[in-house]
Amino acid sequence: MAPKINIGLFGIGLDTYWTQFDGLLARLQSYQTEISEKLSNLGAVIYDAGIVDNPFKAVAAAELFSRNMTDLVVLNISTYALSHNVLPLLQRVSAPVLVLNLQPVKVLDYERFNSMSDRGKMTGEWLSLCQSCVAPELAGVFNRAGIRYHLVTGFLNDESAWSEISDWIEACRVKTSLRDQRVGVMGHYYNGMLDVYSDITLLAAAFGSHFELIELGRLKKMAEEATGNEINEKIRQFRSWFDVSVECSPEDLEGSARSSVALDKLIGKNKLGSLAYYYEGDGDEDYEKIVTTMIPGMTLLTGQHVPVAGECEIKNVLAMKIMDLFEAGGSFSEFYLADFEKDEILLGHDGPSHFRMAEGKVGLVPLPVFHGKPGKGLSIQMKVANGPVTLLSVCQGGDGKTSLLCAEGDSVPGPTMMIANTNSRYKFSLTAKEFINRWSQAGPSHHCAIGRGHISEKIKKLAELMDIGFVRIC
């Protein structure tokens, strides 16, 4: 179940109005209650500071939000308000700010309004609808004060506006989950893949995640301690989740099950939310036996919300985690080849995949050689189900800045290579030539994460909340 985020909600108003226009404050409070309920239904715990209509209430609201460690501050523009009632609040909190400019009705009933005999009541009615009046004032002050904010304009029951608000809340939930996760880094980089090498300090600064460096010896010890019952239960799990080929030998199944038991314990003991690894065990038969038997267990973990990336691709395991937190999957991929006749591109990878994204049951098959790596063993064969997809890469530029690169396309039917890898065919709005050029020139590593659905707008909001770069190819 997705964790809830803490939202600090406050409305704004001008206290002079309350004695001038009877019932206006109560009416605005009822709108705020409705907004609070809608936010709660989107998966948030609400701390409602009410209508802030003077600087003293602003400070009190800031204390309420800070005390409850709010992940997002939502400013509901209730009516016209002085910006000096808002600035001291936002200067005292560090959470991202979402400004709701939601008019209570889609359009004013002018005939009814203009037929009212009491101009005082008419003014009060108008003041309950004049949210847009203060939006430029607030934006101008925030811009000058260096306060980052995000503005949503619409009306109270505007499905489009609430869809956008929902995306902001989901992006905030992902941001908070990234901050709270522990990323395991085990082994070392694939030697010579300069694009894969990461600056972990800058990744920690950008995502807020903790990075735990893990000795492979921990996994080796846990594998040696695995019991026969644990291994047999894991083999049963393999047969339940995978289409196990008759070519898989009992020895290979037992070795992979032993490593899978150890991986589960390693993840649990270190409380990891994701893992990047690579090792070759050159000259050490015991270590080589472990690293060549890990793919089935890592695939199970990836499909159970603990993504694992091979070749120690730390940046890409973060991309996979983002996809998983958006409930879009997140499968480890790289460019395989292009079909220039159909303008389609094949992507895939050996190693762990996200089996919940597969078309049909994932195959577990023996692979006689892990290309570019030592040994042989069991591998995963799958195709991503047809339908809309989003590609995501976490990039680190020469300036040290972190950014998110994404593209939307479709997983499409067609022939693929049956080489005991994930292997799928994709089509984009660009030609294959244009796509490969533009994606490559954006500066990613050669890996990416693939997720289901078109979610680039959500990823863009996540990048804005984290204050990092965002590039969308298509």
Image: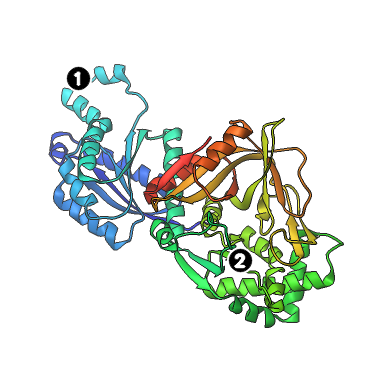
Q: Label 1, on which residue?
A: 117
Q: CA distance from mark 1 to mark 2?
A: 78 Å
Vertical relation: 335 (above or below) 355: above
- What's the residue type where badge 2 is placed? Tyr
Give above or below for 338 relative to 449. above
The structure residue drawn at horizontal position 78% and vertical position 63%, both measured from the top left corner, is 239
Work out whether residue 387 can be spotted: yes
Residue 107 placement, left or right of 339: left
Q: Is residue 42 visible?
A: no
Q: Is residue 168 above or below residue 121?
A: below
Residue at position x 40%, y 59% from top? 202
Q: Position of residue 459 (x, y in %)?
A: 47, 45
Around disc 1, counting alpha carbons within 10 Å, would you say few (fewer than 14), some (14 to 19), or many (20 or more)?
few
Q: Nearer the viewer, residue 424 or 435?
A: 435
Under circle 1, the secondary element is loop
Q: Position of residue 283 (x, y in %)?
A: 68, 76
Q: Which residue is mark 2?
A: 278
Q: Quadrant of residue 216?
A: bottom right
Q: What is the quadrant of residue 156 in the picture?
A: top left
Between 298 and 84, the one nearer to me in the picture: 298
Judge left or right: residue 25 versus residue 161: left
